[in-house]
Image: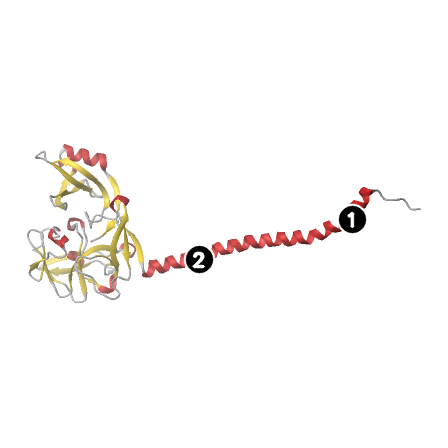
Amino acid sequence: MPPQKSRSNRRATADKPARDADSPLRAVAAADAHKGILLHIREWLDALVIAFVLAMFIRTFVVELFKIPSGSMSPTLLGDFIAEGAALDKEQKSNQYILIKDRGSDEIQMFRKDSKGHYVYEGKKWIGRLTINQRDMFEHNVHLEEHRILVCKFAYWFSQPDRGDIVVFRVPFRSEPNSYIRDEHRFEVPRFNRNQAVYVKRVVAFGGEAVEIAPDGQLVVNGKSVEEPPMFQHLRYLVKPEGAPDFKVKAPPGNLYVFGDNTDNSADSRYWDGVPYDNLRGKAFFRYWPWNKMRFLN
């Protein structure tokens, strides 16, 4: 009689086929898990590609973000080392100031807030000519403030800019320095760097209009002081360069005339004449940085 197998041996023999049957299932499960990870990665990549394409579409046709790199639109849009706060003037009267340091010198541009809440330009001063209180305010509060704005790319697809719009554009490119005569005064126009020639200015006149700057700095178009939109009632422009006659010029057809709000520190149509409509990149409509100055632009 053959020897009987022990109960434990019989159990082991009975379990072996079951374990062998589980092996393919485990392999299939591992393969499915691997495929699941790859599928998850692919879904993320698809989402990133779609997001990138959508972002490029928005940037190209809808809205673009810009950083203000200079003080040419001060005090509306800032892009310099500035200090903002209260200080005493020479008559010991307290005023609210924006003081802006020229990046290439020790001169300070001074903007004082008037009774209507508008900042009025008071010219440039060497930092040592400030009052002690103004200098202390500047030294304790100075910081780099570069505003960031949203620009609507399609704003001028179906309509013309309005007077007073803040526009972003490319200046007419020149590979060599240029000069032109205006009111018997020669203006030297430097060549522009393609990588830095995106400007932000305010529209002041249109092709065919006669543009003047009155002795008090008021903008005059076709013989009348510009009062609409209302910001032109407190904006004041300077005649540059020094020694030039009063600014009187006719905007060329098919062009915009644009000035910086801070014409004491702005390269604009006073130097390189009009801006063709084709050079417009869009309308600046919203400042989103810094957060405490977030608002729509006018």
Disc 1/disc 2 C-alpha distance (Å): 54 Å
> Which residue, given by chain and number where applicable, does mark 1 sit on?
14
| Quarter-of-image position of residue 158 | bottom left
- Report the residue at 20% width, 49% height from top: 76
Question: Colour mode?
Answer: secondary structure
- Report the residue at 14% width, 40% height from top: 125
Helix, strand or loop at mark 1? helix
The residue lying furthest to the front in this view is 7
Q: Amino acid at mark 1?
A: Ala
Counting from the top left corner in percent of width and height, residue 157 is at 26, 65
| Quarter-of-image position of residue 106 | top left
- Report the residue at 18% width, 42% height from top: 98
Image quarter hosting the C terminus:
bottom left
Counting from the top left corner in percent of width and height, residue 230 is at 13, 54
Q: Residues within 10 Å of mark 2 (few under 14, many from 20)?
A: few
Using residue 10 as the reference point, say whether residue 36 is left or right of it: left
Of the two numbered discs 1 and 2 in the rendering, the one whose residue sits closer to the viewer: 1
Nearest the eye: 296 or 130 = 296
Counting from the top left corner in percent of width and height, residue 262 is at 17, 49
Q: Amino acid at mark 2?
A: Val
Q: Earlier in the sequence, mark 1 or mark 2?
A: 1
Is 253 above or below relative to 136?
below
Is 107 above or below relative to 267?
above
**Which of the labelled discs sits on residue 49, or is there none?**
2
